[in-house]
Amino acid sequence: MTYTELLRDIDYVGTPPKGEATLVAQDSRRIVFGAVFVCIVGQSSDGHAFAKQALEDGAGMVVTQRPLG
């Protein structure tokens, strides 16, 4: 599924990348090229702290609960 298809009917900021999403994950250790990383605030950690690393590891898109600045 393309990133644009994933975002259909969703309000978002930015421009979706071209291409296909390869995986949707909330665990940054599972990120592969083209993945969508979903930042979730958990009991022991905050996924937002791993957003930059997910992008460096090849994530094509990061979904957040709040702006990252």
Image: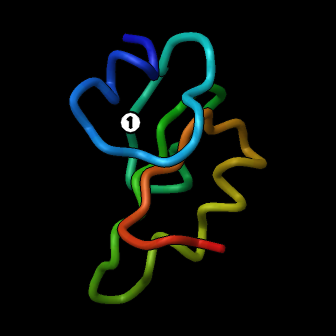
Q: Residue 28's x, y, as percent?
A: 53, 55
SS for callout 1? strand
Residue closest to the eye, 49 or 15? 15
Residue at 43% across / 61% down in the picture?
64
Residue at 33% across / 25% down in the picture?
6
Give the colouring mode of the picture.
rainbow
Residue sitting farthest toward the left = 9
Can you say whether 40 is above or below 34 in the image?
below
Q: Residue 68's x, y, as percent?
A: 59, 72
Q: Is residue 43 left or right of residue 64?
A: left
Q: Residue 9, located in which quarter of the rendered image?
A: top left
How many numbered marks have been drawn onto this rendered protein structure? 1
Residue closest to the eye, 69 or 28? 69
Q: Quadrant of the N terminus?
A: top left
Residue closest to the eye, 18 or 24? 18
Residue closest to the eye, 67 or 35? 67
Q: Residue 8's x, y, as percent?
A: 28, 24
Q: Residue 32, located in which quarter of the rendered image?
A: top right
- Which residue is disc 1 drawn over? 24
Q: Residues within 10 Å of mark 1 (few under 14, many from 20)?
A: some
Q: Is residue 55 left or right of residue 15?
A: right
Can you say whether 15 is above or below 46 in the image?
above
Can you say whether 66 is above or below 34 in the image?
below
Residue at 69% across / 48% down in the picture?
55
Q: Amino acid at mark 1?
A: Val
Can you say whether 51 is above or below 57 in the image?
below
Q: Residue 61, located in which quarter of the rendered image?
A: top right
Q: Residue 50's x, y, as percent?
A: 60, 67
Q: Quadrant of the C terminus?
A: bottom right
Residue sitting farthest toward the right = 56
Residue at 27% across / 87% down in the picture?
43
